Image (cartoon, rainbow, N blue to C red):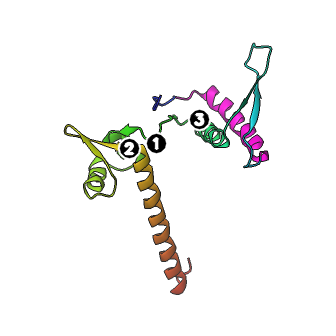
Amino acid sequence: MARREPVLVSESDATVARSAATRLGELLRRVTRTKTPRMRIRPEGAGKDVQLAVPAAALRLLVDALNEMARGNAVTVAAVHAELTTQQAADLLNVSRPYLIKRLDAGEIPFRRVGNRRKVKLGNLLAYKHRDEARRRATADELAAEAQRLKLGY
């Protein structure tokens, strides 16, 4: 499945997620990057362990999801090839839909039309987000350097 609806988090689930994120994060830090972690899982009520290999990237994603759940945030999983509506894309970037449409029409983010609707691939949207964040960091660094040069006390 490419995309699921967000999972809402109860207070008790947030507490469990916080503990699980901490423990799994500690275990993951002990694993070398060259090895695929192997885990033993014993489902509650089952008498037998199940051993499985899990890609380290998937475990890091799980830790991130658990940390978000621990903060009470809803979490969803989407494949990078999943297509979003313009409203979903705007929500992900935390911008208005009209602002996003301007970025699309300016050619900054690839999209395709389905009838009269625009569809944006999640991978393209995330690539734009990373480029935009890098541009913002570079601008902030330039401003900080200029403030230092002018001895503005920042």
Earlier along the polypeptide chain: callout 2 or callout 3? 3
Q: Position of residue 11 (x, y in %)?
A: 61, 28
Q: Position of residue 85 (x, y in %)?
A: 32, 39
Mostly what secondary structure, the magenta segment?
A: helix
Q: Are marks 3 and 1 in contact (CB under 8 Å)?
A: no
Residue 4 in the image: above or below residue 101: above
Circle number at residue 80: 1
Which of the two marks, 3 or 1, is nearer to us in this view?
Answer: 1
Quadrant in which the C terminus appears: bottom right
- Residue type indicated by callout 3: Met
**Highlighted magenta segment, given as a residue range:** 8-31
- Residue type indicated by callout 2: Lys
Circle number at residue 121: 2
Dot 1: few (<14), some (14–19), or many (≥20) neighbours within 10 Å?
some
Earlier along the polypeptide chain: callout 2 or callout 1? 1
Q: Position of residue 4 (x, y in %)?
A: 47, 29
Instruction: Look at 43% across and 60% down and name the residue there.
Output: 132
Please, what secondary structure does the residue beneath circle 3 have? helix
Q: Is residue 37 left or right of residue 119?
A: right
